[in-house]
Image (cartoon, grey):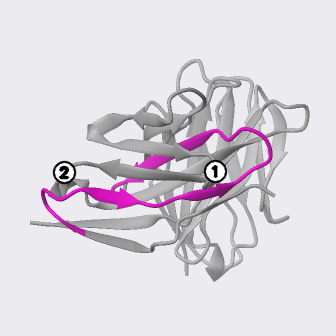
Amino acid sequence: DSGVTQTPKHLITATGQRVTLRCSPRSGDLSVYWYQQSLDQGLQFLIQYYNGEERAKGNILERFSAQQFPDLHSELNLSSLELGDSALYFCASSVWNSYGYTFGSGTRLTVV
Amino acid sequence: AQSVAQPEDQVNVAEGNPLTVKCTYSVSGNPYLFWYVQYPNRGLQFLLKYITGDNLVKGSYGFEAEFNKSQTSFHLKKPSALVSDSALYFCAVRVLNYGGSQGNLIFGKGTKLSVKP
């Protein structure tokens, strides 16, 4: 167990729907990062939060949004889902300005 | 723009033989480089990092990596491969946010390592 908890582990939903993925960072970590892993695009950085504030944005679609709450857990919201959104979504956390991340085990999203 | 390249989609090695998984990078400034491993249906696990200092970095499970600034490479190595090393390996570089603070990791496409008995 890495200490980063992601729920749910698997999610199957229909096109056009909206889902929320949840991440609880490792105890003491203030930074949360979201990544999307797909076969054709590899690991793509989506967004970074630090202590509730957005710090950096990557290749995140406008249909996707995220937030980090006061208790430091983070949620990634995916809406108007398309077949191409099917992927593994990873959350990682780190102490501010540390060099390494700790990854969660991911949420596998399947859009049908 | 900062980037990482892993030129091999797959590396095949016989158990007991040495292995090398290649990585090259392009960054402005000093690179912060990482290797992660991903086993099937699992998250990424940290193997090792280079921040500064000795060019040969030792990490988990007997892996090491050699930083070569002139060749902008950070190849992952292991003297004697095990079947259990079979997994997906990712090289990554850390970018800096505006203002110089540590930002996100940029990953290579990954290299599938297959170790045969």
Whether residue B40 can be seen here: no
Q: Position of residue B112 (x, y in %)?
A: 37, 67
Q: Secondary structure at mark 2?
A: loop
State the count of labels: 2
Q: Which residue is mark 1?
A: B70
Kind of residue sitting beneath label 1? Ser
Q: Which mark is residue B80?
A: 2
C-beta proximity under 8 Å, tags 2 and 1? no
- Write down the quadrant of residue B114 in the picture: bottom left
Q: Residues within 10 Å of mark 1 (few under 14, many from 20)?
A: few
- Given residues A54 and B90, the one toward you in this image is B90
Magenta residue check for B31: yes
* Residue type, label 2: Ser
Q: Quadrant of residue B1?
A: bottom right
Q: What span is colored magenta in the figure?
A: B13-40
Vertical relation: B24 (above or below) A49: below
